[in-house]
Amino acid sequence: MLDQIRDLYQEVVFDHNRNPRNFRVMEDANRTIEGFNPLCGDRITLYVKIDGDGVIRDLSFQGSGCAISTASASLMTEIVRGMHESQAHALFQTFHRIATGKDEAVNLEELGKLAVLAGVRAYPARVKCATLAWHSLEAALENKETTVTTE
Amino acid sequence: MRTAPAAIPAFDVARIRKDFPILGQQVHGKPLVYLDNAATAQKPKAVLDCIAKVYTEDYANVHRGVHALSQRATELFEGAREKVQRHLNARHSHEIVFTRGTTEAINLVAQSYGRPRFKAGDEILITAMEHHSNIVPWQMLCEQTGAVLKVVPIDRTGTLLLDQFEALLSNRTRLLAVAHMSNALGTINPVEKLIEQAHRHGVPVLVDGAQAVPHMAVDVQALNCDFYALSGHKLYGPAGIGILYGKEELLNKMPPYQGGGDMIRRVTFEKTEYNTLPYKFEAGTPSIVDAIALGAAIDYVNGIGIETIAGHEQRLLAYATEQALRIPGLELVGQAADKGAILSFTLHRIHPHDIGTILDHLGIAIRAGHHCAMPVMDFFGVPATARASFGLYNTFEEVDALIAGIHKVIEVFG
C-alpha cells in the first residue's frame, strides 16, 4: 500500500524523524541562526562550530517541523560534519538542483546519504521542508545574523 | 441563526454532487475527497455556465456605454448586487460594495472609515481567533494613526471570553472587528450579542463573514452590524469578488478608498466630485463577470436552502467529530459549543504537513498549516494543525474516508 509515498517517506526518514541526531543546543557554537518557513510555521535553530580554515567541526539543531524537515536537518548535521564549507555548499547546490526538479538526469550517487530525500522532487509543496535546514546552514556559513526564511 | 439539524430533512447529496464537475475526478488514482472548503469551495455548473454565458453573450464594460451590450452587462451586474442585498437582507442595494474579497473589504473600512477618524490612544478591538486579514489591516491602521490594537482572549475550547470582551470595551474603543466564524477553529461567535454590547458603548462593529456566509443565513439588519465583509469564492462563487456591506449612513460619511474611473461624478484638474454610493467605492472596471457569477452562486445556494445546507453540514460535523475523538493521539483544536463544519486537529508526534501529504495520496484534500491564523496556533502551542472543512456536497462516506485515512497516517508513521 502507498508504495509511492514510500519514495518520500523512506525508513531512514522515519528513523531520523523519530530519533533526530544532534538534536541539542550547542553552547559554544560560533554561528547560530534561526530558520523559518512562513508557509507552514516550521522553525529551526541551527548551531554551527566552524574553524578558522572553514572546516565545519560540529553542528546541531533544535526546533519543530514535519518529518521531512526534521529528517533533513538531522541528516545534514551528520553529513556535513568535517566538511569544508565549500564542500557543504556544493552538496547543497546539487541537492537543491535535484530536489527542485531542475536536474533531469538525476544522479542520486552524487548525493550519497542525502539520496533518501530525493523523493521530495515529486512533491513540489514539500521541497521547502527538505531545504529549510540547508538554507539555514548557507546563511550560517555566510555569517548572516538575521532569521533566514524559505520565502 | 441556525435551525437544529434534527428538524432538517436529508437532501439528495448524490444529486448535488453532479452539479460540481470537478468532484468527479480521481486524484492519485483515488476518488477525490475535497475537504478544504474553508480555504475555498468548488463551483457548481450553474456558476461555471454563467461565467461562460456572460463572456460569450453579454459582456461589455458597465455603467459606461450607451450600446446594447453595455446596458445588458450593467443590468446583470446591478442585478447581482440586488441578489447580494436580498441574501444579506440589507436595506438598500447601494449598501452593497463589490470588492476583490473579504480582505479588500476590511482594508477599505480600515483606510476609509478608520484612518481619517482614529487618533493616538484610540483602541481597536479584535479577537484572538481572527484570520490575518482581520488583524493586519488594523495593525497597519494603528501604525498610521497611533491607535492601539486590543485583543479579546479565548479559552482552550476556542470560545470567546465574553466577560473579557465586556472588560475591554471602554470609551477609548473606536471599533470592534470580529469573525462571525473562525476559519481555524470553527467557532461561531455570538455576534448579535457582541454587536449589541458594543453599540451600548457607541462602538461600531465590522463582522468578518468570510467563513460564516456559506454555512448560515445572515441578516445584517437583524444583526445590526455596521459593516459585514465576505468573499464570493467560499460561497461557491468565483474568486476575485467579494462584498462589503456597510450601513448607508456610515458609507456616506466615508471618503473614497481608491481613486479612478466610475467613482467620480465630475472631474476637473481643480476638483473632483465623487460619485454616489456604492460607486464611490468601486474605482476602475470591476470584476464584472465574477460579480454576476456570485449572483448565480447565491441563487444556487438558495435553490437548496441555506438552512438545509447548514443542517447537512452540522450532521457531517457531528459524525466526523464523534469518529475523530475515538482515534488515539488525535486532539481536536477548537471545541466550542457553537461550531461550524470545521474539524481542526493534531496527531501525537505527526506533523500536519505529513498528515496532509499522506491524505493527499489517498485522494483526500485537507489543509495543513497555520490557516493564516498564527496567533491561534501560538495560543494552542502548535506550529500548525490539519483541518478538514465540509461543504454542502460532502458525504458521510467522505468522512469515513477521512477517518480511514487518518488511521493510515498513524499506521505509516507507526
Image: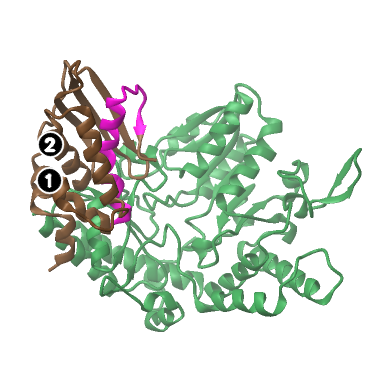
Chain colours: A brown, B green
What predominant SS class does the magenta segment belong to?
Answer: helix
User: For mark 2, what is the residue?
Assistant: A79
User: For mark 1, what is the residue?
Assistant: A112
| Residue at the spot 46% in from the left edge and 45% down from the top edge | B131
- CA separation in Å, label 2 and label 1: 9 Å
Q: Nearer the viewer, residue B315 or B261?
A: B261
Give the quarter of the image for residue B76.
bottom right
Q: Chain of mark 2?
A: A
Mark 2: few/some/many CA within 10 Å (<14, 14-19, 20+)? some
Q: Earlier in the sequence, mark 2 or mark 1?
A: 2
Residue B356 visible in this rendered orientation of the protein:
no
Q: Is residue A132 magenta?
A: yes
- Could you tell me which secondary element the residue under label 2 belongs to? helix
Image location (x, y in percent) of residue B315: 33, 68
Q: Type of residue at label 2?
A: Ile
Give the foreground label among 2 and 1.
Answer: 1
Residue B346 visible in this rendered orientation of the protein:
yes
Q: Do callouts 2 and 1 mark residues in contact (Cβ within 8 Å)?
A: yes
Q: Type of residue at label 1?
A: Gly
| Residue at the spot 23% in from the left edge and 41% down from the top edge | A65
| Residue at the spot 82% in from the left edge and 64% down from the top edge | B64
The magenta span reads A123-148
